[in-house]
Amino acid sequence: MSSRLFQNVREKYGLAYSIGAGHSAYVGTGTFDISAAVSPENTAVVAELIENEIKRIKAEKLTPEEIERAKIQLRGNYILSNESVGARMQTIGRTVLLDKPLRTPEEVIEKIMAVDTEAAAEIIDRVLDTSTLTVTTVGPIDSAEGLFSF
């Protein structure tokens, strides 16, 4: 609810029932997605607002304050997730399956807190590569063509 997309599209303009971004990481690949539940008549304007946010974050990157807030939130989420034995076992199992080194909670938190503006900017440039953009719509939309001008 604190994301730029949520604050702009849902809170400021009231154009989406829900909106958010997420990722799925795999060995050597992955996806980054932005999803929004909107009325068909709001699709084009919400797409424009999403495009504007992508352009803005690519141009301006994240501020040190935004990065600090994100690190604190991620650290808190990580600590809370470690309170569940099942979640810890899933993390360990995924780590072993991906042939990655097992890290202590302290090591993970140290890595989270080490993220800086340069590291975040590098990820933004890599993940928000609009040349690989794919648009999918579900519902009474005739076409997604032309929704984005990247």
Image (tube, helix red, strand yellow):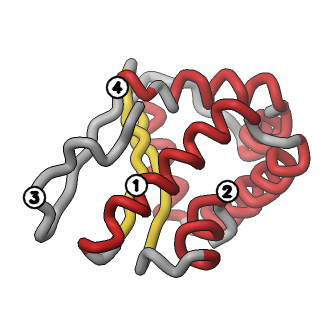
Sequence order check, earlier mark of 2 and 1 = 1
What number is the disc on residue 123? none
Residue 83 visible somewhere in the drawing: no
- Distance between the Cα atoms at labels 3 and 2? 41 Å
Is residue 80 shown left or right of residue 54? right
Q: Nearer the viewer, mark 3 or mark 2?
A: 3
The amino acid marked with disc number 2 is Tyr
Q: Which residue has dot 2 on it?
A: 78
Q: Residues within 10 Å of mark 3 (few under 14, many from 20)?
A: few
Sequence order check, earlier mark of 1 and 3 = 1
Helix, strand or loop for disc 1: helix
Q: Residues within 10 Å of mark 4 (few under 14, many from 20)?
A: few
Q: Residues within 10 Å of mark 1 (few under 14, many from 20)?
A: some
The one nearer the camera, 87 or 10, is 10
- Distance between the Cα atoms at labels 2 and 1? 32 Å
- Quadrant of image for the N terminus: bottom right
**Can you give x and y, in whole percent of width and height, for residue 11 in the image?**
61, 78
